[in-house]
Image: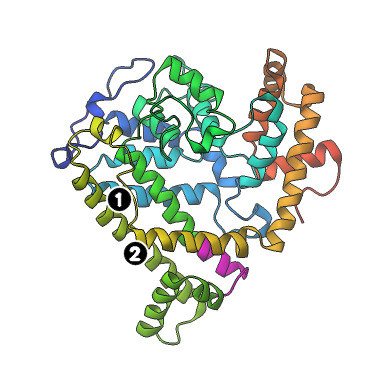
Amino acid sequence: MANVEGLPNRAPYAADPARARRCVAEPPSPTRTEFQRDRDRIVHSTAFRRLAHKTQVFVHHEGDHFRTRLTHTIEVAQIARALARALKLDDDLAEAVALGHDLGHTPFGHTGEDALDACMGPYGGFDHNSHALRIVTEIERRYADFDGLNLTDATLAGLVKHNGPLLDASGLPTPRYRERGVPAAVLAWDRRRPLGLSLYASLEAQAAALADDIAYDAHDIDDGLRAGLFALAGIRAAVPFVDAIAAEVDRLHPGLEQPRAIHELTRRVITRFIEDAIGESRRRIAEAGVASPEAVATAGRALAGLSPPCEAADRDIKTFLFSHMYRHPQVQAVREKADAIVRRLFSAFLAGPSAMPPDWAAKAGSGEPARAVADYIAGMTDRFAVHEHARLFGGPADLR
């Protein structure tokens, strides 16, 4: 394994790349740690490249400057690295989980996932986290010796559990999965390579999950303001946390032009959340007295997190964005069209698999045709899904 500068400063509760294991054993790299290899494999994967043309909140026709899944993912990775380094974790593992956390997303953001999940209701449903696991263990076919990317167990567990355990101590699904159960793909992999579904993920994975929340809040405020979906005065009136930061910008830079004022606001939102997360996570780690990765897994709670005041600010921001951005009439109009596209594509391909490329048609014919169709659609970019819909049904090749 590579000798990495800075490893002696790693905390005892940090993940250790020297202990990392893969499903298919491989010779060690002379220049990279195992987690660095995981990160690099994710970056070079087909699924990662496709994130450039998958929706975050807006769809591709609305402008080139709004965030896509790829730009969001890169921003999450930057924040995850910052948190990991401050907490003396393995920042390569945190970055790998951050870079892979959205690989399983469909075209058209959560709208596409909801539509595909509804279509797959009779066939086990669709969940982007379990689909990400299938991408990196099965669907990506690039290497001569294995399917998937052959990532380390630590990275796989981080992708599956970064939002918390999937099972409770008695083996029952946690509230998030209580109604529908843990996805079959996750349970199948857990039987093959135990993921510790009732345990907490590494602190590195927890840092990636926290980074995802921070990025969402700050960057959706940025995109929403610049798109004109809501006004700065509106979010200031609804969210005291944002109002206090905006007042600071006004005091330091009176009369600042709007684009600069928005940037100064969002960069300060990120900074406040990161600094709070570092302090609160250090407090939780010290309080729990963890001295190993195993102790983190059995701590009984997430050890990376925000303080109560910042958790309240996070809730306020998400509540505001839900009503003023995600459910804005302009966004809703596009969501309805996107929903219809996914549902019609699913019905068409399930009824006639030959309309898909030959390799996908062959997968549909070899068993579980609905899952093959879902996999094909989930891999589409927004633009390709729209074009496929136009090819099969006619009509405009966009969402206007």
What are the residue bounds of the magenta stretch? 220-231
Residue 115: x percent and y percent? 70, 40
Quadrant of image for the C terminus:
bottom right
Tag 2 residue: 272
Q: In which quarter of the image is the N terminus?
A: top left
Residue at position x 37%, y 31% from top? 155
Q: Answer whether residue 222 is magenta in the image.
A: yes
The image shows residue 77 at horizontal and vertical percentages of 39, 47
Residue highlighted by disc 1: 83
Q: What residue type is labelled 1?
A: Leu
**Residue, far right:** 394
Q: In this view, does 368 lie to the left or right of 216?
A: right
Seen from the viewer's position, the closer of residues 318 and 347 is: 318
Where 208 falls versus 172 (above or below)? below
Q: 128 left or right of 372?
A: left
**Of all residues shown, which one is farthest toward the bottom?**
255
Q: Position of residue 145 (x, y in %)?
A: 44, 14
Q: Residue at x 71, y 57 (%)?
A: 332
Q: What residue type is labelled 2?
A: Arg
Please say if the residues under marks 2 and 1 sit with CB atoms less than 8 Å apart: no
Q: Main secondary structure of the magenta part?
A: helix
- Examine the rendered structure and indicate whether residue 324 appears above or below residue 378: below
> In percent of the image, x 37 and y 25: which residue is there?
196
Q: Residues within 10 Å of mark 1 (few under 14, many from 20)?
A: many
How far is disc 2 from disc 1 in space, using C-alphas? Answer: 12 Å
Q: What element carries label 2?
A: helix
Determine the secondary structure under disc 1: helix
Q: Can residue 357 be seen in this view?
A: yes
Q: Is residue 46 visible?
A: no
* Picture quadrant of residue 7: top left
